[in-house]
Amino acid sequence: MKRKLLFFCLAMLSVVGLSSFQTNDDPIMALLKKLEEFTKKYPVEKVYLHLDKPYYAAGDNIWFKAYVTDWKTGELTPMSTVLYVELINQNNNIEKKLILPMQNGLTWGDFKLADALSEGNYRIRAYTQWMRNAGPNFFFDKTIKIGNGWTNKVFTKTQFSPFKKDSIRASIDVQFLPEGGTLLEGVKSKIAIKAIGSNGLGIKIKGKIVDQTGTEISTFETSDLGMGGVYLIPEPNKTYTAKIDPNQSILLPKAEKTGYSIAFRAIDSTKFIATVKISNDLLNNGVLNLVAQKNGLPYMATKLATTARATEIVYENKDLPQGIVQFTLFSPNLTPVCERIVFVNNRANSIQVDLQQLKSNYSRKEKVELSLFSRLSSEPIPASFSVSVTNADAVAPDLAHESNILANLLLTSGLVGYVENPNSYFLNNDSKTSEALDYLMLTQGWRKIGWKLVEPVITHEVEKGLKIRGVITKNAMPLPLSTVSLVTNKDGIFKIDTVSNDKGEFTFENLEFSDSTKFIIQALTEANKKDVLVGIKHYPEQEVTAIPTNEVEVNVNESINNYLNKSRPYFEEQSRQGLLSKTTLLKEVNIESKRVNLAPNSKNLNGPGIADQVVDVSQLGLAKNVAEYLQGRVANVKIIGGTATNMRTYKAGFGTSLGGTSSGKDGKSGSMHVILDGMDMGSTESDEFDLRQLNPQEIESIEVLTSLSKLAVYGPNASRGLIIVTSKKGSSSTTNTTKYAPGVTTYFPKGYSVSREFYSPKYDVAPSDKPDLRTTVFWAPNLVTDEMGKVKFDYFNTEQPGNYRIVIEGIDVSGNLARKTYTYSVN
């Protein structure tokens, strides 16, 4: 919808039209322009994930599509092209992390859940690096239940006394929040009420309002979600108290003698009224401005004369954007004095979705052929959709908690804190739902004045691709203007160069590579690289906050018991086909092993761990350097400075090196070579490789080969001995840089995850007698309607009878959203 700036009032009572108003000189215009420039300068992104199911079981797949939008406009983001999606376990640790390439704000992927995964409350979190500047309020962070009724059939039920009803009621937190921010003497005002129990969820309460003499003024009651309201006309010099059953008293906010108040109420489903009231002493004192804006984008500015105590302005939903709109009343000197947020249910901004050819009844394994049509205001419109089909008899819909694009992008992402049952506000379009939604705005969205434009601290850049960053140093000092080379041989030889800046920093940008890609980074400028180090700068990990207690399900397996029972035959069949390994979780036992391989990932040609000595590196991270740590720990090896000499071959006269023979006099010509991650780094002799250059914290294992029997596999040129070093490949280091060898380092960064394609059988092409027991029947993350608003798709039902549920969500280029559900029967 095109935004509108209106500078003439639409009013039912005394509002003066300022015909001589000059917008170029108007201070409110300058303020709105400043606001718009600020939000343009500091754009914000937010993300939503459509999940194929509301809950899962160990062994399941979590399929998802990501919609990343510009917070200001609601349109798909043109900024970031990289999305991070994490599966966080019940211990608040990251179980799995995906990095996904994103195009025009859209991407999709999946998590394969281990079949031995413990049941619990897990979370799926998604964000871009740029999003981290605005904080986690804009992340997608959803708690999901994952059960395990397949590998473990013993269910337990746990109860905690803090969640007993009496305990919850004993510590109720009740807030009384005046509409618009303040109470005004002699002015009838609505006071919103929010009651929360000790479990963080809303609770139903009753009470009454009394004055200082104990005289009852009115009564109130909250809903099951703990929200309600009461009207009050505060009298001068009086105080008011809320008496809450059974024995709780709360003093209400004090009414002001002078000031402004603002109130909103719906006329019908298409329009609403704003009422502005002022105290007598402020009459005939300039012009007020009532500004409507959403996420920093102004839509309306209405001028109000101060000639009457009450002024009413009618707003039509069609003139405002869908979602949370913030109304701010400015005094004549442009000071914000009242503020209220309103949820505008502008159905004209919703994409209408129709499915054609859908029948009410189908047979098992029958082909379902459908045409999806998308329209906006009765006109065809192209849009991108994700479609999930599940067997609702097995996957009972969780209407209050399942992912919902409308509830997320229009509601919860615009409110601070936990919103209980957000989907309930979008299930019905009636007066009761509208009233509940408005009480949510009055409580969860209550605010005094929030108009300051605070310059954010930008610590994370917009990502247009993957990056590899680092720093070149020499003798611990930055090495500017050093040529740096990035090389990998995965999928063919790839090599690019760059030059470090005046701080020695280098960046390789806009890269595309998958996981398990090995890079070699080398500084090429210095001929003598003894003291030249290549360090890798790692992005700091996003902190994982604790799961909100009000989202914790104590008995996960019991809560989704029906799904676990219905999905067990599917997992049993998957196991019979060798697609799962049925694992039974046992109690932890201690088993003594005769031999522990201390170098399991080594590229030692003799085999991992087959060496004359494998160094215990458990305390290596505490050492100053590797050379110092090895002194006295390795038999038959003498270490002086950063040089290691194999005394077996030295004393025996085997001084043959990779380039000639040794004199055997200075103790250096017999120096050993270092093999790092399978690559010969050269001799530890002074001008080639110094053991002190290795970073102890980045080493996984060290193997020492000193005997001819172990060195034979490497050929005669290795007769001086080898030190085989294996790095922590791709580990998430807590240090800022990773230093391996003079002038060169190997790096295994986490790259893009490969998204799998959802398997959908084609029984008309390849008939099969194998049982088809899938609970997610169909998943399509990228259905795009054409210019006529049409796209076709098809799939086959499973052999399981039941009521099947289709969930369709989507978005167009202007940020208009779609959500529609359909059901049909399979017999």
Image (spheres, rainbow, N blue to C red):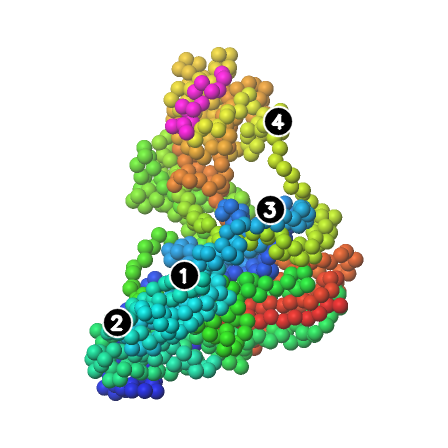
Quarter-wise, where is residue 183 in the image?
bottom left
| Sequence-first tag of 1 and 3 | 3
Q: In this view, does 35 lie to the left or right of 361?
A: left
- Tell me where residue 177 appears, x and y as whole percent: 37, 67
Sequence-wise first label, 4 or 3? 3
Task: Tell me the amino acid under the disc marked 4.
Answer: Glu
Residue 417 as seen in the image, left or right of residue 504: right
Q: How far separated are the C-alphas under marks 1 and 4? A: 61 Å
Task: Check disc 1 and report the residue beneath it.
Answer: 248
Q: Nearer the viewer, mark 1 or mark 3?
A: 1
Give the number of the disc on residue 118.
3
Rendered position, 639 above or below 245: above
Q: Please tell me whether mark 1 sits on a helix, a strand or a loop.
A: strand
Q: Which residue is drawn at 46% across and 74% down?
A: 435
Establish if 351 lies above or below 118: below
**In the image, which residues are magenta?**
622-636
Instruction: Say whether disc 2 or disc 1 marks the residue closer to the N-terminus.
Output: 2
Residue 495 visible? The answer is yes
Q: Which residue is drawn at 44% across and 56% down?
A: 171
Residue type at the position of mark 1:
Gln
Q: How far apart are marks 2 and 4 (CA)?
A: 80 Å
Q: Residue at x 34, y 87 (%)?
A: 12
Q: Residue 63 carries which label?
A: none
Q: Can residue 718 be seen in this view?
A: no
Q: Which of 510 and 279 is in front in this view?
A: 279
Tell me which secondary structure the magenta stretch mostly adopts: loop
Residue that extends furthest to the right in the rendered view of this protein: 769
User: How far apart are the alpha carbons under marks 1 and 3?
Assistant: 42 Å
- Residue highlighted by disc 2: 237
- Is 623 in the magenta? yes
Label 2: which secondary element: loop
Crowd band around label 1 with a 10 angstrom C-alpha radius: few (<14), some (14–19), many (20+): few
